[in-house]
Amino acid sequence: MKKSHSGVGIPVPTLVLEAFALNRVRKSRLRFRIIKANDGNQDLSLEDLLCRTLAMMTNTEGD
């Protein structure tokens, strides 16, 4: 019989796999936020670059 965590009924191996998956997502998010690009004299995050690219493609302005 497999053990479950705190009587919830979810097997421990399943909880471990879910924890590993969440950790991979967290690491990917941190890597995404760390990457920077330099635009002249200011650093831009990938999020800023995405917003600027979409603004240019749709011919709109925004911050």
Image: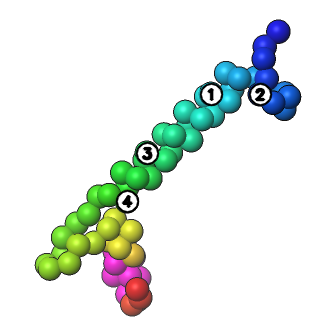
Q: Residues within 10 Å of mark 1 (few under 14, many from 20)?
A: few
Mark 3 or mark 4, which has the lower sequence index?
3
The secondary structure that dominates the magenta segment is: helix
Mark 4 or mark 1, which has the lower sequence index?
1
Left-right relation of 25 to 62: right
- What is the spatial separation of the Cα atoms under label 2 and label 1, in whole angstroms? 11 Å
**What is the magenta range?**
52-59
Residue type indicated by callout 3: Lys
Q: Is residue 57 visible?
A: no
* Image coords of residue 37 (percent x, y): 22, 66
Q: Residues within 10 Å of mark 2 (few under 14, many from 20)?
A: few
- Specify the quadrant of the image occupied by residue 57: bottom left
- What is the spatial separation of the Cα atoms under label 3 and label 1, in whole angstroms? 17 Å
- Per the image, label 4 sits on a secondary structure element best described as helix
Mark 2 or mark 3, which has the lower sequence index?
2
State yes or no: residue 43 in magenta. no
Q: Residue at x 27, y 72 (%)?
A: 44
Label annotation for residue 5: 2
Q: Residue at x 84, y 32 (%)?
A: 8
Label annotation for residue 6: none
What residue is pinned by disc 3? 27
What residue is pinned by disc 4? 33
**Quadrant position of the C terminus in the picture:** bottom left
Residue type indicated by callout 1: Val
* Image coords of residue 61 (percent x, y): 39, 90
